[in-house]
Amino acid sequence: MLPKASTTIGLDEFTIFMRAYQDMVYSTAVRLTGDEAEAQDIAQEVFLRAHRHFDELQQSGTIGGWLKTVATNLALNHLSRYRKRWQLFSQMHVNDDEDESPIDVEIAETATFELEAEQRQRCVEQALRALPDHQRVPLVLFHFEEIPYEEIARKLHVSLPKIKTDIFRARNALMKTLIRQGVTSVTQDL
Amino acid sequence: MNSTDPQNVNIERLVAQILSSQPNSIAPRSLEERVLRTLRDRTALPWWRRAYSEWPSAARMGFIFASAGLVGLVLAVAAWIDLGTRAVREITWLMQPIIWGGHLIHVASTLHEALGATVHSLPLQWIYGFGVIFVACYAMFFTLSAAAYRTLFVDMPYQR
């Protein structure tokens, strides 16, 4: 006898479910991988797994959290698999393209957005994708997934000080890009 | 890096504010189509081409028994190669229902003898020589791959 999920769930019901969550799943994947095609593959795998456990998911009441966790784990697995394959070679690569200079303007305490919401969203997404993986991934896990530093360090198998440094540099790099693009103001609020 | 510096505190607060106000990206239309197409394709597959977890219970049990039998067969063949003819006779008798027949044993026995004769006829220096050549080839291909990687791939994913 086949498991219930594959026999009794109508695709119409699952389509409604997918439409409700696909943006969230896709966003999680694309922010972590920084690549739209890879994010689609990951999102597809998330929904195929969701279909397998659809009955349990509908009863659990934590569908969103489950989908987000699976998307995050799959994206990290994807990155770490790729990283491990090339780790030895990538260590030979001298990382000399990181901008270490401090932000030389006064940063406002609260953000004043200069652009329209849609344009701002696009700029922020682009700025995120422009970050190197080792900065973007911990930044996304910290700010979007709200995972604490220690947990991020454990997930990525990286030391805690390195994670803090990467996130710190990622924030600086992101701010510089956003200031340059005029997404947010830079003057101190009075 | 100073996390208590007011400038850094402001940057952290501002980035958090900007990112938390960021709405989800719109998933491409093709995602839904891809998932549904895959699900339809999977539904149309016969049970034996689906994931193991979706197999009927009887088939799953049968697969476990068949796998155990195969493992037994492999162990028996390995033991036979290792222990010699006497052990083979005993194990063959034990594995009689699984092993197809004497011709399989004959073929394996011939291969075993041929391989043994070849290894024993080689001078020790040749074996060391093969080892050195193998290591040299490995080092050469590794160096070439590293050079090609550095040349062709500038931007590394998740450098650490």
Image: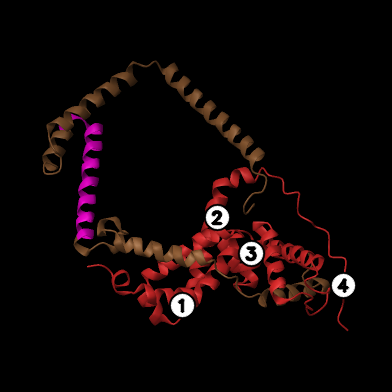
Instruction: Please give the letter of the chain rendered in red.
Output: A
Query: Does B104 sit left or right of A42 as displayed?
Result: left
Callout in the foreground (2, 1): 1
Where does the magenta region start and end? B59-86
Depth check, front residue: A138 or B1: A138
Upstream in sequence: badge 3 or badge 1: 1
**Magenta span: helix, strand or loop, mainly?**
helix
Callout in the foreground (3, 4): 4
Its colouring scheme is by chain
Amino acid on which disc 3 is placed: Pro
Proximity of marks 3 and 4: CB atoms separated by less than 8 Å:
no
Residue A2 in sight in this render: yes
Amino acid on which disc 1 is placed: Ile
Gap in angstroms between the C-alphas marked 3 and 1: 24 Å
Which of the numbered marks, if any, corresponds to residue A80? Answer: 2
Say which quarter of the image contains residue A12. bottom left
Amino acid on which disc 2 is placed: Ser
Depth check, front residue: A175 or A23: A23
Which of the numbered marks, if any, corresponds to residue A106? Answer: 4
Proximity of marks 2 and 3: CB atoms separated by less than 8 Å:
no
Query: Does B66 sit left or right of B5 as displayed?
Result: left
Which of the numbered marks, if any, corresponds to residue A138? Answer: 3
Residue A153 in sight in this render: no
